[in-house]
Image (cartoon, rainbow, N blue to C red):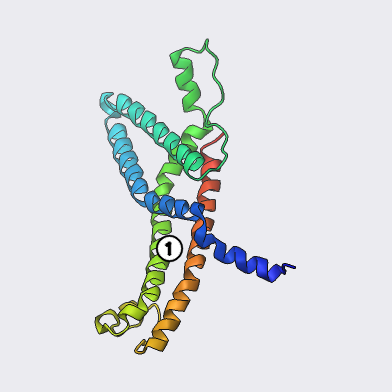
Amino acid sequence: MTYPTQTAGWNFFRVMGSVKAYRNLIYLLAAFPLGIFYFVFLISGLSTGISLLIVWVGIPILLLVGAGWWLLASFERMLVVYWLKEDMPAMTRASHNEENLWMRLIKHITHPVTWKSLLYLILKFPLGIASFMIVITLASLTLALLSTPFTYDAHQFFQDGGFLGLGVLDWNIDSMQDALLAALIGLLLWPVTLHVINGLVWLHARFARLMLSV
């Protein structure tokens, strides 16, 4: 007979062997440099295009930037669909063949997803930074705790101000017993880290679905 507490405990630790959890980890780590690239491209392109509108050169620049952000948004949608294995509706509805280029341009400009995708790419920068900091902090703390039995007597790793000199834990580890306890805490912290990563990716996927689909 399987008790609910046993099932919950197994599910809690099973995440350590989940391939999806590590795919999610890679996705969050990649979100940081991608967010920087999107932000720099959009801000520099839009500011340049708007500033040159007075001499008409800004119009083709803005059109190119608009095409660029649509391609980047399509790339982000592909990441969510194929990397995160999330089901998402299309970004646009099917167009009629009799529509000319001008009609398609007007339809694209007035399409809500066009502007939602722009906002999504801009917000990818702060969201990427926040996710990256959370993941790096938890992963670094976990690895530091797990490696404590091998480094607890290396005093340069434990300066005044707390664990690893970061003030994370006010814990002076000076014996193998304490080091093994720290490693056990690190072992328990790793599934917690992976669950947090899965939760963050779930939020990213829901946000992408809201902003990058009709």
Res 13 → quadrant: bottom right
The disc labelled 1 sits on which kind of residue?
A: Ile
Question: Viewer-proximal residue, 160 or 79?
Answer: 79
Compared to residue 31, the image places residue 194 above or below, namely below
Residue 47 lies, in percent from the top left, at: 30, 38
Quadrant of the snapshot with the N terminus: bottom right
Residue 113 visible within the image: yes
Q: How many marks?
A: 1
At x 30%, y 36%, the residue is: 45
Look at the picture and state if 106 lies above or below 37. Answer: above
Q: Which residue is mark 1?
A: 134
Left/right placement of residue 154 relative to residue 207 reads left
Depth check, front residue: 199 or 111: 199
Report the front residue among 6 and 28: 6
**Image position, residue 150 (x, y; %):** 32, 78
Judged from this view, the residue extending furthest toward the front is 1
Q: Position of residue 69 (x, y in %)?
A: 39, 34
Q: Secondary structure at mark 1?
A: helix
Q: Quadrant of residue 152?
A: bottom left
Residue depicted at x 40% and y 65%: 139
**Point 38% across, 30% down: residue:** 66
Q: Which image quarter is the C terminus in?
A: top right
In the foreground, 171 or 155: 155
Q: Is residue 141 above or below residue 25?
A: below
Q: Residue at x 57, y 34 (%)?
A: 89
Residue 170 is at least partly visible in this image: no
What is the crowding at mark 1: few (fewer than 14 residues within 10 Å), some, or many (at least 20)? some
Direction right: furthest residue: 1
Q: Quick check: 60 above or below 186?
A: above
Pinpoint residue 68: horizontal percent, then vertical percent. 36, 32
